Amino acid sequence: MTKTNILIVGVGGQGTLLASVLLGNLALDKDYDVKLSEVHGMAQRGGSVVTHVKISEDGVNSPLIEEGDADVIIAFEELEAYRWLPYLKKGGTMYVNTQQWLPMPVVMGQAKYPENIMETLEKNAAKVKAFDALKIAEECGSVKAVNVVLLGAASNDLPFDEDAWIKVIEENVKPKFVDLNKKAFELGRNA
């Protein structure tokens, strides 16, 4: 891996920021240059949250990923995958939690949730790996583990060995949640 650009997108409260911290610390542990940039859009109220993660052997100059330049998008829900699709590069991969969070305009009846999102993603992305990460997280004991389930799935296409992932979980997750998150990672990796 000389350079990898990863967007982590979701809704406030889903754990996108912890996912980016785990990924960033993992890359740092392996002596890569890493830049993270977080954008919070009313995150406390269920708004859109995106983290740009740039990893490189040769150095990273800017923390932001431009349209058409993300190698991987990890989407914590379908609409966020749809919103950020233009950022995926040709040949890129999307990991999508099939969960749907209704934005406030939809809840209030002022807008409609887009139809056929998965069809649009599959038509426009090179690879879409979609699955119910929420169900897997619930099997692990906490809906808050969706982030680590998705990282587990994406780990199959990232150049870090499984032991390194487990180590970064152990070092960055509160001790009482380490076993739950290790299980979430393993189930995500095998999803």
Image (spheres, grey):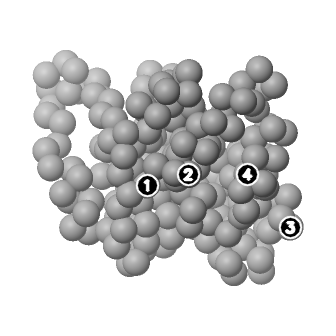
Secondary structure beneath disc 3? loop
Q: Give the distance between the C-alpha atoms of the residues marked 3 and 1, in whole angstroms.
A: 25 Å
Which amino acid, by three-letter code, is at mark 3?
Answer: Asp
Q: Is residue 28 left or right of residue 109?
A: right
Cβ–Cβ under 8 Å for marks 3 and 1:
no
Is any atom of residue 148 visible in this view? no
Counting other residues with Cα less than 10 Å from the Cα at mark 3, is it few (<14), some (14-19), or many (20 or more)?
A: few
Q: Are marks 4 and 1 in contact (CB under 8 Å)?
A: no
Task: Name the residue beneath numbered marker 2.
Answer: 189
Using the image, determine if residue 85 lies above or below residue 137: below
Please provide percent x and percent y for residue 102.
28, 28
Q: CA distance from mark 4 to mark 2?
A: 11 Å
Tell me the CA gap for discs 1 and 2.
12 Å
Identify which amino acid the numbered label 2 is placed on.
Answer: Arg
Residue beneath disc 4: 165
Q: Which residue is mark 1?
A: 95
Tell me: residue 20, above or below residue 161: above
